[in-house]
Image (cartoon, rainbow, N blue to C red):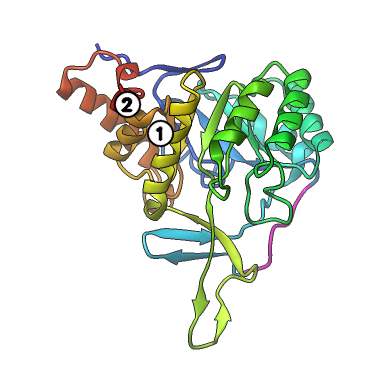
Amino acid sequence: MVNTSVKIGKLTLRNPVMTGSGTFGFGSEMSEALDLSALGACVVKSTSREPRLGNPTPRIIETSSGILNAIGLQNGGIDNFIEEKLPFLRQYDVPIIVNLVGYEVADYVYLAERLTEAGGVHALEINISCPNVKHGCDFAVDPKLTFELITALRKATDLTLITKLSPNVTDVVSVGRAAADAGSDALSLINTLLGTAIDIRKRKFRLANVTGGLSGPAIKPIALRMVWQVHQALPNIPLVGMGGIVTANDAIEFLLAGATAVAVGTATFINPTAAIDVANGIEKFLAEQGIDDVNELIGAVTR
């Protein structure tokens, strides 16, 4: 029998496929389309200390081979998540990973402490890299600030920490190293790329926010390069690769480049079962290739 399980910090995933935060809601929205328990992990939408309304509309448009979004981290806040979202998620036999956002270190620490105390959350994805809100990337572009944030979080919780890196930097390795040195158990990459689009007839920007984050197949080569780059520099820290994964073949490329797990995001908008399809496709590939353990693929292109 083929082994598809992988480890991310304290987490053991039955397969290496997660959902991408921001594209999967809080689980209940997608639960009629797929069995959440069949996922490697369920990464839910960003959660902040206070409720956020998000950016003005229009805030999502299609582009060539991708989506440009400027949602602005809309969510009901931590109280709403713990009281209304978390009880639903606890029904499923799947690791729950909550994506955290904040304005300052104290916000992230508060969220981490609340979620640790609440129970039922298995890991925290630390979102330091949202390009769609003011100061959303402040931590992700400064290794010193990243180190200070993750150090504070490491002291605040024993949950697995996954720091989400930005592609909108000149040196992604230095930020990843700072997070790892501070105690992050894993890194996820990449968040969206900053972009814009213009309506040529109205002569106006198509997004009310002017700029937004580009995701989807268009960014896959960039994401793949960054995963390979970080794995080369930090081979001992697990990576969660994401950015344009639509098929199992896409996911296998990320594993070969050095990712221990992958996240399927934008593809879910086209095919709600995309993450499950990718997981099944990886298992089929392993069987066809006569590979007993998915871990044999991790970083294999560099060996």
Q: Amino acid at mark 1?
A: Trp
Q: Residue at x 66, y 41 (%)?
A: 128
Q: Tell whether 217 sits left or right of 287.
A: right
Q: Tell whether 156 sits left or right of 224.
A: right
- For residue 132, which quarter of the picture? bottom right
Task: Provide the residue span drawn in magenta.
Answer: 51-57
Query: Between marks 1 and 2, how big is the CA–CA gap?
Result: 8 Å
Does dot 2 land on a helix, a strand or a loop?
helix
Quarter holding the N terminus?
A: top left
- Percent from the top left, x then y, of residue 29? 53, 44
Q: What residue did someone put label 2 on?
A: 302
Q: Residue at x 65, y 67 (%)?
A: 209
Q: Is residue 112 visible?
A: yes
Q: Amino acid at mark 2?
A: Thr
Does dot 1 land on a helix, a strand or a loop?
helix
Do callouts 1 and 2 mark residues in contact (Cβ within 8 Å)?
yes
Quarter holding the C terminus?
A: top left
Position of residue 98 relative to residue 201, above or below, is: above
Q: What residue did someone put label 1 on?
A: 228
Q: Residue at x 54, y 23 (%)?
A: 95
Q: Residue at x 66, y 56 (%)?
A: 72
